[in-house]
Amino acid sequence: MKVPVRWLAIFVLLLGMTGLFLGQTPAPLPATDQIYACPMDPDVRGHDPGTCPRCGMKLVAGIPDPVEYTMDLHVIPPAPKLLQRTRFEFVVRDPWKERPVTNFQLVHEKLFHMFVVSQDLKFFVHDHPVFEKDGVFHYDLALPQPGMYRILGDFYPDGATPQLIAKTVLVAGKAPAPVTLTRDYSTKNASNMQVELVTDPPQPIAHTKTMMFFRVKPGDGLEKYLGAWGHMLAASDDLIDLIHTHPFLADGGPEIQFNMIFPRARTYRVWVQFQRMGVVNTAYFDVPVEELK
């Protein structure tokens, strides 16, 4: 005997209700398809909102495809003079109609991270220009010697993805001789700590992952600096490559791990910054990178 489909549906419904009356737990609802990911570390993702355990940034749902923005840099005066105050003005423009961007997301507690590195890699600045309502960031700085400077802007336009854009500024005068870096993993004395470096592999290879293990002494009193347990800038000796990144593993203890994929076979100067007892410590190491043989 055939049972009408409608009676089968009623039977299934009554069976489910009977299960509820008997105290049985109903089947769980299917998980949401919404994915939250870190804009800085897109491999950190999950179904729940929150913050990235790696870098501390807010997880975002539906990260857009990467699109490159542009950044104008106006220098006042146009020809910077040695040891005289120079104003840097940054304007970020969208890639569609080149309109000035006026809305930005915080990246590690700031709207704009600026790095300045001199041609001989002896001068290093990590600071944060002031934002004006018309979309202009400005920063005043006296450049200490003639030659070339590379200026790196790190920012996050609202509705886009984080951006890293570098510019070049020249100061007239006799430029320093071309820099020649050799391997330097020696322990560094910073403001109120020592910093040691070990890499795995011991000889970093271009285009492959290098794990960089930093150990700080003393290991107590460490604090997050700008929302992260550390900051790193890696610059190739010819200043073509500039990479800003944050720890891969860190928990407030004396061991801090960064992961780096160096893009070319060059020697890189790597600056790291850690905060201890309210003091920001800056140390640098020189890391030769070879091609895979």
Image (tube, helix red, strand yellow):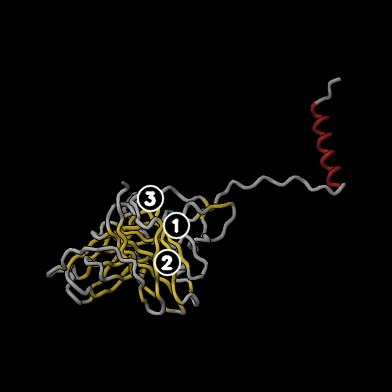
SS for dot 1 = loop
Between marks 3 and 1 in the image, the one whose residue lies nearer the viewer? 3
- Tell how many labels: 3
Residue that label 2 marks: 214
As drawn, 28 above or below 218: above
Examine the image and state in which quarter residue 215 appears: bottom left
Mark 3 neighbour class, 10 Å CA radius: few under 14, some 14 to 19, many 20 or more: some
Q: Residue 134, position in %: x, y?
A: 34, 65
Disc 3 residue type?
Thr
Residue that label 1 marks: 40
Structural distance between the alpha carbons of marks 2 and 3: 19 Å
As drawn, 223 above or below 91: below
As drawn, 94 above or below 133: above
Residue at point 17%, 74% (across, down): 82
Looking at the image, is mark 1 or mark 2 earlier in the sequence? Answer: 1
Q: Residue 71, position in %: x, y?
A: 30, 58
Structural distance between the alpha carbons of marks 1 and 2: 21 Å
Residue that label 3 marks: 208
Nearest to the observer: residue 150 or residue 4: 150
Does residue 114 show up? Answer: no
Q: Residue 59, position in %: x, y?
A: 52, 57
Nearest to the observer: residue 275 or residue 14: 275
Q: Is residue 222 left or right of residue 263?
A: right
| Label 3 with label 1: CB-CB less than 8 Å | no
Disc 1 residue type?
Met
Examine the image and state in which quarter residue 40 appears: bottom left
Disc 2 residue type?
Phe
